[in-house]
Amino acid sequence: MLRNLNPILSPDLLYILASMGHGDEIVIADANFPSDSSTDRLVRLDGVAAPDVVEAVLSIMPLDNFVDDPARSMQIVGKPDEIPPVVQEYQEIINKTADFPAQIESVERFAFYEEAKKAYAIVQTGELRIYGNLILKKGVVAPS
């Protein structure tokens, strides 16, 4: 047992987050995302809402402030300018939790899949809202 850690941060997820370096990316995926076929590093958090996972991850992982798009979501097919409610919720979490808040950029669906395949790891959540997928780029942990 550890103190001051969100209990959503399982041992496997903590290991992955600690192993990631600056610029590595993690995908927080909804329940429909093809996670298993997209990565060799998969953490399953079935039954856990994706916004809760985003908040837990950002409570210990800095966002990269050296790039323009450290947070990216999947665009709605045929409606690239529409922001799904779950992504609006992610933006609120980033605004209040991230040490370097950033605007979420949207990525075309198939381009998002290709980016996800290059990510360090994927966390499959129990999120049932569609388009509930987010890529986060890890920043630098610097002394305070």
Image (cartoon, grey):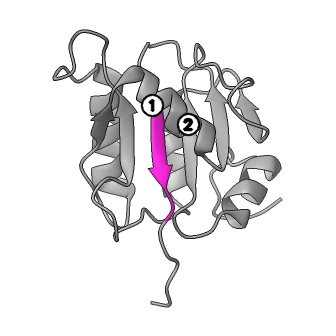
Q: Mark 2 falls on what kind of element? A: helix
Image quadrant containing the N terminus: bottom right
In the image, residue 137 above or below residue 38: below
Q: Which residue is mark 2?
A: 116
| Residue at horizontal 35 percent and vertical 45 percent from the top | 93
Q: Residues within 10 Å of mark 1 (few under 14, many from 20)?
A: some
Note whether residue 122 is visible: yes
The stretch of residues the image draws in magenta is 132-138
> Could you say where residue 90 lies in the image, as x and y percent from the top left?
36, 37
Q: Mark 1 falls on what kind of element? A: helix
Based on the picture, tell me whether residue 133 belongs to the magenta stretch.
yes
Image quadrant containing the C terminus: bottom left
> Could you say where residue 88 lies in the image, as x and y percent from the top left?
27, 31
| Residue at horizontal 81 percent and vertical 51 percent from the top | 11
> Could you say where residue 35 lies in the image, as x and y percent from the top left?
67, 25
Count of labels in the image:
2
124 left or right of 88? right
The image quadrant of residue 108 is top left
132 left or right of 95? right
Q: CA distance from mark 1 to mark 2?
A: 6 Å
Q: Are marks 1 and 2 in contact (CB under 8 Å)?
A: yes
Q: Residues within 10 Å of mark 2 (few under 14, many from 20)?
A: many
Specify the amino acid type for callout 1. Phe
Say which mark, if any, is on residue 112: 1
Outermost residue on the left side: it is: 81
| Residue at horizontal 56 percent and vertical 63 percent from the top | 60
The image quadrant of residue 32 is top right
Note whether residue 132 is visible: no
82 left or right of 45? left
In the image, residue 5 above or below residue 117: below
